[in-house]
Image (cartoon, helix red, strand yellow):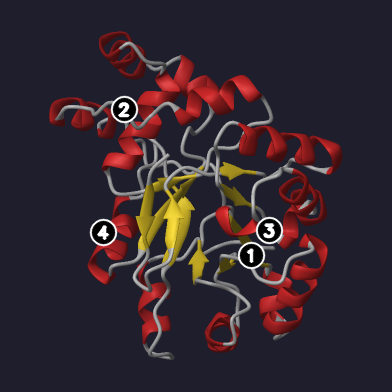
Amino acid sequence: MEWTQLENGVKMPLLGLGTWRLVGSGAEDAVRQAIGLGYRHIDTAAMYGNEEAVGRAVRQSGVPREEIFVTTKLWTEDVRRGRAREALMESLSRLGMDYVDLYLIHWPAEGYQKAWQVMTDLYHEGWCRAIGVANFEEDHLASLCGVSDMKPLVDQFESHPTFGNGAVLAACAARHIQPVAYSPLGRGEDLAGSDTLRRLAKKYGRTPAQIALRWALQRGMAVIPKTARASRMEENSQIFDFKLRRKDMEAVSAMETGHRLSADPHHFTF
């Protein structure tokens, strides 16, 4: 496992387990298995409805809390209602934790500038070791820099071989914000059916998923692939002992289609 250091000095694992759509005992089992395989970054959110399960799995893992990096997120309804502080306290209660390592605004809903100001207070009070955003485009990032002297430390957004989201990646690089890719494998059928990824997998003695994840790492991103299968977790973790050559990085980038899998951050309805 490799780590990156955020601008405030906090270290974050470059590989994490995404838990969207994992609920109940399924979420608990997945998190427990991931930690057992060496994962030290678990990504959840209030909207996922699995914070309680994530918290139980972390406590039951036998790994000290300070060695596990936990991310959760402020949902859009709470952004609009001005409940950033209350929502974090509720998340902490569900997680059974005194702090989270990273707290993100989940989407740029109306009121996100005010939510960010509250989150900077929560950060300085020690309720979260780092704060950031998710699904923020360049204009959203710029607006936050105008309302606070503290910029986001992380921006988590959709990025995979068929939608690299290069403009947001460049905006993060310009502002020294750590990018995190969600859905880094895109659709499973896209990976399995990609001649490019299959060719590179054969060349490097890897799997298409490992090629896609390695591509993201070499673009400077952290990744949080979601899976409930231990075999896939193990496969996804084996990405730190090889590197793609420049021409092969370019070949993966050439898979770009411009089509998102998730909502457009400028036009979402939830």
In the shown orientation, is residue 259 left or right of residue 97?
left
- Callout 3–callout 1 Cβ contact below 8 Å: yes
Q: In the drawing, what numbered circle is on residue 73?
A: 1
Check residue 224 in the rendering and tell me which mark sits there, or answer none: none
Q: Residue 60: x and y, percent? A: 78, 45
Circle nearer the viewer, 4 or 1: 1
- Viewer-closest of 269 and 63: 63
Q: How far is the residue under mark 4 from the one under mark 2?
A: 26 Å
Query: Would you identify the image quadrant in which residue 205 lies?
Result: top left
Marked residue nearer the N-terminal end (3 or 2): 3
Q: Quadrant of residue 153?
A: bottom left
Near mark 2 (Cα within 10 A), the count class, few <14, some 14-19 or many ≥20, is: few
Query: Residue 64 at x, y = what percent?
Result: 64, 53
Report how far apart the C-alphas of labels 1 and 2 lie in the structure.
31 Å
Spatial CA distance of label 3 from label 2 is: 30 Å
N-terminal label among 3 and 4: 3
At 73% from the left edge and 73% from the top edge, which residue is drawn?
Answer: 77
Placement of the C terminus among the 4 image quadrants: bottom right
